[in-house]
């Protein structure tokens, strides 16, 4: 890497506001808000709206739709034409 043009790679907290979940990772993101890590190290604290802890796809809280009900409703609304009709 060329010296002097890249931001510093550092530990940073990502906090999910919706789930109350936080994790520590390495990133070049910056934040003026800091938090104290469990080992006493001060790290930037970056708040995110959604993460794997609160996203429906990852948390298993997806809404399951009743496909049979959808198909039945469609068939009632749009019946098949009688045979012999043009």
Image (cartoon, rainbow, N blue to C red):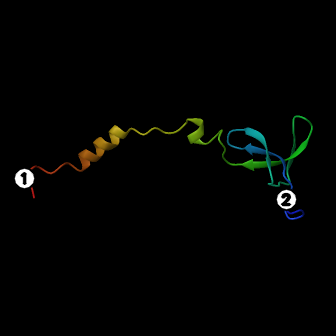
Q: Is residue 26 above or below residue 30?
A: above
Residue at figure coordinates x 86%, y 65% from the top left:
5
Q: Quadrant of residue 24?
A: top right
Residue 52 falls left or right of residue 9: left
Q: Where residue 28 appears, x then y in whole percent?
A: 81, 54
Q: Quadrant of residue 56?
A: top right
Give the spatial CA distance, label 2 vs label 1. 74 Å
Residue at figure coordinates x 71%, y 49% from the top left:
48
Disc nearest the viewer among 2 and 1: 2
Q: Where residue 50 appears, x then y in whole percent?
A: 66, 46
| Disc on res. 7 | 2
Residue at figure coordinates x 61%, y 42% from the top left:
55
Q: Quadrant of residue 35?
A: top right
Q: Secondary structure at mark 1?
A: loop
> Which quarter of the image is occupied by the C terminus?
bottom left
Q: Where residue 19 appears, x then y in whole percent?
A: 68, 39
Q: Where residue 45 appears, x then y in whole percent?
A: 82, 47
């Amino acid at each position: 890497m060329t010296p002097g043009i890249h931001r510093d790679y550092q530990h940073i907290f990502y906090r999910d506001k919706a789930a109350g979940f936080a994790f520590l990772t390495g990133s070049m993101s910056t934040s003026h808000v800091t938090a104290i890590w469990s080992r006493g190290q001060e790290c930037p604290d970056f708040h995110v709206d959604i993460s794997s802890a609160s996203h429906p796809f990852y948390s298993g809280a997806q809404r399951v739709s009743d496909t049979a009900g959808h198909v039945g409703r469609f068939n009632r609304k749009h019946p098949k034409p009688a045979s012999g009709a043009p």
